[in-house]
Image (spheres, rainbow, N blue to C red):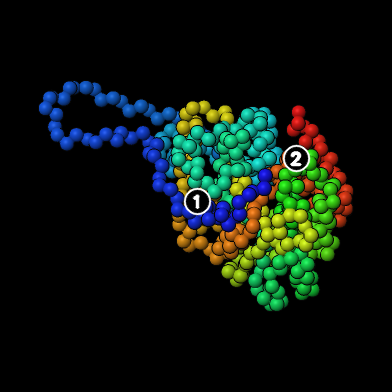
Amino acid sequence: MKKSTLLTATLLAAFTMVASACGSDNNGGNNTPASTEASQEPAATTEATPTPAAKDVTLSLRHTQIKETSKNRLKILEDVVKKTQDENPGLTFKLEGIDEVVNRDQKLKAEMTAGNPPDIFEVFGGADLNLYVKAGRMLDLTPIIEELGIKDKFASLDEFTVDGKVYGLPFGGYSEGIFYNKKIFSDLGLSVPTSWDQLLETADKIKAAGITPLGLAAKDGWVNGMLWNTVMERNVGIDAINKLVTGETKWTDEGFIKGFTDYATLVNKDYFTKGALGLAYADQGAQLLSGKAAMVFTGSWDANRFTGDEAGDLKGQIGYFNFPSIAGGAGDQTSINASYSNGFGFSANLNEDQVAMVKKFIANFYSEEIQKRTLLEDKVLPSMKLSDLSGVDPLISDVLTVMANASTSWKAYDAIVQPAVGAVVNVGLQELIGKVSKPEKVAKDIQAAQDKANAAAAK
């Protein structure tokens, strides 16, 4: 459902609202004051009650922070794990790091089918989570976050909420837009484009200067979906995308065909990187930082890379702007793809002792201290409300400003349509990039997958 509140209000809640007072002590301490007078009666001789031995509890934890660009995020996670283990003798975490795409599209799906997911695992909200909840694989976190007093401290739990219950917790937020090389724009006398026509004119001038207008690494299908997703939303609106899963709209409708056609325009004008289909995602940001590409469309999670040592002389010379409006489009032309989709889920198979330790992990990970570290060290937008925003990098400030100026926000297509449909979308976009298919054919193939997925969901 399209969000009814302005993103400005969301940001005020998420980033400037003073956090509420700390919740109650969950350690079960005795609050009775100690007596200040000696007892008038001799103390009875009793044997000391032996301290119960700590229970041995093991929790497997699957993460995807295996890349060099994710080392700060991994360090934060490892610090939380160590703190939780130190505070709870007998507790052992077994960490496993794997590729994000492998986890999402292969391993976790197979484990969910078999009913043996890890105890704690990274998971996407929206469509992915809905399937796992329907299968009974996810632990209901509603009573846990209420007990810990943190339910109302999150900016949004929409993508992890099913039928009023919370089944996952986002560890950060994001927005998607265009990061650009300010030096190239200055040297070529360019301004930030605010319309589709201006974007095409800007890209033509950049291309004429021998520079790739839009860096792209298209080997992984989801990467192509980011820019396309916004082009499609500008053309049809998020309501139309939501209605694909109910059959009220179709990928073959006129507005959707226009969305595919506009994306194909960027391809056919050769604005994207040559040979993009053979390039892995990491190469996309490298194109911007090397000066080979003037712009890249990606998520705010890449801000860490664009502000780090890899940026070199371009540190401080990378800016961020929202995708331009498309005249005649049915979508909200100043909206933005921004949400809280990436998070941790917990297995419904956990026993009582494991659930008790999961509470400890959640309390330590979802704290203002860790959220602030995530913002400063990893440049990931916090998923919880912070009372202190000091020390924020200028590029992150740009991101927050763009988000604040957006009229509404919406979640990505792959958090709306069924995973099987999203996979066909990814293939179709690669076919457009490879110039081996036309918009109408791509739309027809995706609609066939949508019909099949909708029919299966109705059973």
The amino acid on which the numbered mark 2 sits, given as a three-letter code, is Val
Q: How many marks?
A: 2
Q: Left of 424 or right of it: where is 59?
A: left
Q: Which mark is residue 385?
A: 1
Earlier residue among tags 2 and 1? 2
In the rendered image, which quarter contains the N terminus? top right
Task: Tell me where residue 405 sits by quadrant.
Answer: bottom right
Name, please, the residue furthest toward the front: 4
Residue 371 position, x and y percent, is 50, 51
User: Closer to the camera, 373 or 176?
Assistant: 176
User: Closer to the camera, 329 or 413?
Assistant: 329
- Which element type, helix, strand or loop, lies under badge 2? helix
User: Closer to the camera, 86 or 428?
Assistant: 428
User: Closer to the camera, 223 or 281?
Assistant: 223
Confirm or deny contact between disc 2 and disc 1 (CB under 8 A).
no
Task: Tell me where residue 184 sits by quadrant.
Answer: bottom right
Q: Which residue is under mark 2?
A: 245
- Spatial separation of the CA atoms under disc 2 and disc 1: 32 Å
**Mark 2 closeness class: few <14, some 14–19, many ≥20 residues within 10 Å:** many
Q: Residue at x 22, y 35 (%)?
A: 34
Residue 382 position, x and y percent, is 53, 52
Task: Using the rendered image of the protein, determine whether residue 431 is visible from the camera's viewpoint.
Answer: no
